[in-house]
């Protein structure tokens, strides 16, 4: 792993050296151009050491960038090795039973632990070199004269060195206090099974194999914020250079906390995690949920196996972790040992509540309206408002027209009357009446004549007979 890290660093260094040579050539060419332009007025405007200063500054910048990239690769490699060590601990506790296999796994884990310790030391050496090149620390100050960084290095080495060495076998006994009981009440209310009475108290006594102590390697998860920070674009020489100009130590955790609480933390892992969640919320939550579930389930099954056989199967432990994450309690499975309860509190309750809270926030953020959606909805509302306004105007105009028509209909305009016109109208009516009476009289006379003819014919017929 160290060779792979050096190979990646060598590739990055060759790439940076190529870029540095190109920029150096551009600076030299620009300097020659300026010299040719100022040759008429004299060369006092461009000092002879200008190119040397520019190339020196470029070399310093690229060297600093190279250190940042190398530290990034070292952090990522250290985290990968730490997680491989955690996986080997789970294999040693759950899937390996023979002494030879356990010995092989522990030898491999010890070798990886040694590589991890070397990477941690290398990381602090690179960090010290970065501080020197940023002029945050005097060049003559050695890392051993910096107590804060030295204490941090020793603490990190102590955490990373935790592992079960090869050749360690056997078991150790634990007495876990449960509750007190008086000697007078012991005969009436003895300690219930599987508790044991001792010194006026009831204890839960159980044994662990020494490989259970390998679960302390879970403390190596402290490297996770570094990996999250390295995956972002906020750990580079540019942000550190800006911080140096403004007398701000952008590499300190205090700066990250202050920025997280007040502004935009360019060096905070929390800010990088928020950026990742905004870009890929459900992918990040799925990975975090699965990682928490797997780690907590394995740790719970290993710690509860000697006392609580119902949680020895991995699926039962995973079921209890999921229920704890969802704040659901059926009561069918519970953690008995103190270690199992701590795992459920940290991996189930704390991590689960955080993950479910972030999931709810991600869902609401996913269904939330963006600026384009709000702009489109505002446009639709504006169009609907304009349509209602036009309809109201049309209805108002129609109401006015109907009211005006009703008022006009109420008004009566009489015709113009003249004497001559009235006489003509009366004469016409009289003539029409006389003509109608004459026609009716003619019709009646014709009917009388027809009746008389009929009577005459009947009389002549009767006389001849």
Image: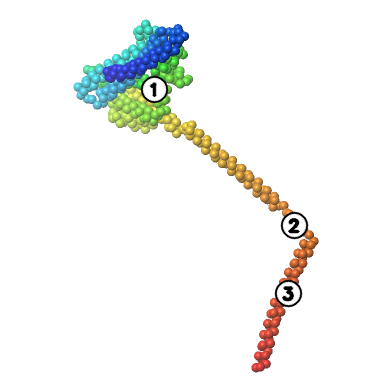
**Which quarter shows the N terminus?**
top left
Residue 248 appears left or right of 297: right
The residue beneath circle 2 is 415
Between 125 and 10, the one lying in front of the other is 10
Q: Which mark is residue 232?
A: 1
- The earlier-in-sequence mark between 3 and 2 is 2
Query: Which residue is painted at 35% across and 9% down in the image?
Result: 143
Q: Residues within 10 Å of mark 2 (few under 14, many from 20)?
A: few
User: How packed is label 3: few (under 14 Cα within 10 Å), some, or many (20 or more)?
Assistant: few
On the image, which quarter does residue 50 sit in? top left
Front-most of residues 86 and 7:
7
Q: Judge depth for marks 1 and 3 and give the one in front.
A: 3
Pick out the residue farthest to the right. Answer: 419
Mark 1 Cα-neighbour bin, 10 Å: few <14, some 14–19, many ≥20: some
Q: CA distance from mark 3 to mark 2?
A: 33 Å
Asked which colour scheme the image uses, the reply is rainbow
Q: Position of residue 248 (x, y in %)?
A: 45, 14
Which residue position holds label 3?
Answer: 438
In the rendered structure, which disc, 1 or 3, sits on the residue that comes first in sequence? 1
Q: Is residue 217 left or right of residue 250?
A: left
Q: Secondary structure at mark 3?
A: helix
Nearest to viewer (mark 2 / mark 1):
2
At horizontal 77% and vertical 67% (from top left) the residue drawn is 427
Q: Relative to 138, say whether 415 is above or below.
A: below
């Amino acid at each position: 792993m160290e060779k792979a890290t050096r190979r990646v660093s060598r590739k990055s260094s060759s790439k940076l050296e190529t870029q540095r040579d190109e920029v150096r050539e551009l600076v030299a060419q620009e300097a020659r151009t300026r010299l040719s332009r100022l040759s008429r007025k004299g060369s006092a405007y461009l000092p002879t050491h200008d190119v040397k200063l520019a190339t020196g500054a470029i070399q310093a910048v690229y060297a600093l960038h190279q250190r940042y990239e190398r530290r990034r690769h070292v952090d990522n490699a250290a985290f990968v090795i730490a997680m491989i060590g955690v996986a080997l601990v789970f294999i040693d506790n759950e899937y390996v039973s023979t002494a030879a296999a356990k010995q092989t796994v522990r030898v491999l884990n010890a070798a990886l632990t040694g590589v991890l310790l070397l990477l941690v030391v290398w990381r602090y050496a690179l960090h010290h070199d970065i501080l020197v090149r940023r002029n945050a620390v005097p060049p003559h100050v050695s890392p051993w004269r910096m107590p804060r960084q030295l204490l941090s290095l020793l603490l990190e080495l102590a955490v990373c060195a935790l592992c079960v060495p090869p050749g360690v076998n056997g078991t150790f006994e634990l007495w876990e206090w449960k509750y007190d009981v008086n000697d007078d009440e012991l005969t009436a209310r003895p300690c219930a099974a599987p508790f044991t009475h001792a010194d006026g108290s009831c204890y839960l006594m159980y044994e662990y194999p020494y490989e259970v102590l390998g679960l302390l390697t879970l403390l190596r998860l402290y490297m996770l914020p570094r990996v999250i920070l390295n995956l972002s674009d906020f750990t580079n020489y540019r942000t550190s250079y800006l911080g140096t100009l403004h007398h701000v130590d952008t590499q300190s955790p205090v700066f990250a906390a202050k920025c997280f609480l007040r502004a935009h933390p360019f060096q905070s892992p929390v800010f990088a995690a928020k950026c990742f969640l905004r870009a890929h919320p459900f992918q990040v939550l799925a990975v975090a949920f699965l990682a928490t579930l797997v780690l907590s389930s394995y740790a719970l099954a290993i710690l509860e196996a000697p006392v609580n056989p119902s949680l020895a199967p991995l699926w039962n432990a995973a079921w209890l972790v999921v229920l704890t994450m969802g704040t659901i309690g059926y009561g069918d499975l519970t953690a008995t040992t103190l270690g199992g309860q701590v795992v459920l509190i940290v991996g189930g309750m704390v991590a689960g509540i955080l993950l479910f809270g972030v999931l709810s926030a991600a869902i609401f953020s996913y269904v939330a309206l963006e600026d384009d959606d709000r702009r489109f909805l505002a446009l639709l509302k504006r169009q609907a408002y304009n349509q209602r306004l036009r309809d109201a105007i049309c209805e108002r105009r129609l109401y006015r027209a109907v009211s005006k028509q009703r008022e006009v209909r109420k008004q009566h305009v009489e015709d113009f009357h003249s004497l001559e016109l009235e006489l003509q109208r009366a004469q016409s009516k009289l003539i029409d009446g006389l003509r109608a009476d004459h026609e009716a009289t003619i019709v009646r006379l014709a009917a009388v004549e027809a009746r008389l003819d009929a009577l005459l014919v009947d009389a002549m017929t009767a006389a001849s007979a």
